[in-house]
Image (cartoon, helix red, strand yellow):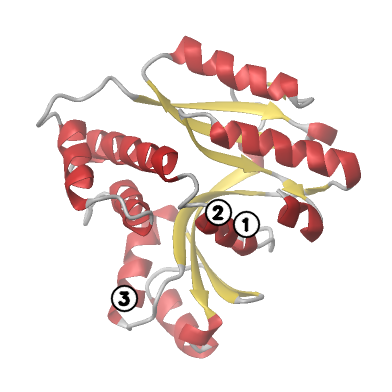
Amino acid sequence: MSGHSKWSTIKRKKALVDARRAKIWTKCLKEIQVAAKMGGADPAGNARLRLAMDKARVSNVPKDRIKAAVDKGTGASGADNLEDVHYEGYGPSGVAIFVEAMTDNRNRTVGEVRHVFERYGGHLGTAGSVAWMFHKRGIIHVLKADAAEERLMEVALDAGASDVRDDGEVWTVDCDPGAFLAVQDALAAAQIAVANAEIDHVPENRIALVGDKAESMMKLLGALEDLDEVHNVYANHDVPEEILEKY
């Protein structure tokens, strides 16, 4: 597993919530709808729905909008024909990129994704071309000020986590997606506050980029994330801190 931390990136994204609220709300509600459609309306037994609802709350999505999205997903109020799709491709220097999206029109969405790849010097690949480079993991961040390492390790590992590591400002709890809810519940029961929790696609290895290639990569990822139907973008890149700050 890569030891690379996404915490600094996550903090920056949280800071953009106010500036991009409408787009973020739309993406949150789509994810809730599809999660409810796929796994049912009970977040206690649907990890994807619980995660989507938690992200919506962090983004201050109103409770009635969240409930309406759940109802829509389960068919209680007439669901849209949304479906999960993913795309795989390459960016500068052969960086692998895995894109998760939700759409009611596959042809439109793949055209938009392909256009962004090509505009920023990448190209869309075939199904399976890069997915094998990523491992799906549950990742939970706990601020160091909120938990001692020994206590956090005891609670997390007993609940099924695979690892707890030091990532600068935070402890990073790593677990199999199947243990994601159990680990979160155990942390809550132990009164250990969670700063961020997500199901992530963690790359096996990373490609270091500098200069123009690093900047092109950040522009490509940003343009993909700005597409209305794209919900998550994962890549096996590693760029300097000053480039992350800039973008």
Picture residue at 76% right of the left edge, 38% below the top: 217
Q: Amino acid at mark 2?
A: Lys
Image: 154 above or below 46: below
Q: Amino acid at mark 3?
A: Ala
Q: CA distance from mark 1 to mark 3?
A: 24 Å
Picture residue at 57% right of the left edge, 13% below the top: 111
Q: Residue 126: tell me if it is visible.
A: no
Picture residue at 41% right of the left edge, 14% below the top: 105
Q: Which of the labelled discs sits on residue 188, or is there none?
A: 3
Q: CA distance from mark 2 to mark 3?
A: 24 Å
Q: Which of the labelled discs sits on residue 102, or is there none?
A: none
In this picture, residue 20 sits left or right of residue 123 = left
Residue 86 is situated, as x and y percent measured from the top left of the image, at: 51, 28
Mark 2 or mark 1: which is in front?
Answer: 2
The answer to whether the residues at label 2 and label 1 have Cβ atoms under 8 Å apart is yes
Q: Amino acid at mark 1?
A: Thr
Residue 175 is situated, as x and y percent measured from the top left of the image, at: 48, 62
Please tell me in which quadrant of the rendered image residue 83 appears: top left
Report which residue position mark 1 lands on. Answer: 9
Mark 1 or mark 3: which is in front?
Answer: 1
Mark 3 Cα-neighbour bin, 10 Å: few <14, some 14–19, many ≥20? few
Q: CA distance from mark 2 to mark 1?
A: 6 Å
For label 1, the SS is helix
Residue 98 is situated, as x and y percent measured from the top left of the image, at: 60, 35
Nearer-the-camera pick, 68 or 43: 68
For marks 2 and 3, the one nearer the N-term is 2
For label 2, the SS is helix
Where, quadrant-wise, is the N terminus in this rendering? bottom right
Image: 6 above or below 159: above
Q: Which of the labelled discs sits on residue 13, or is there none?
A: 2
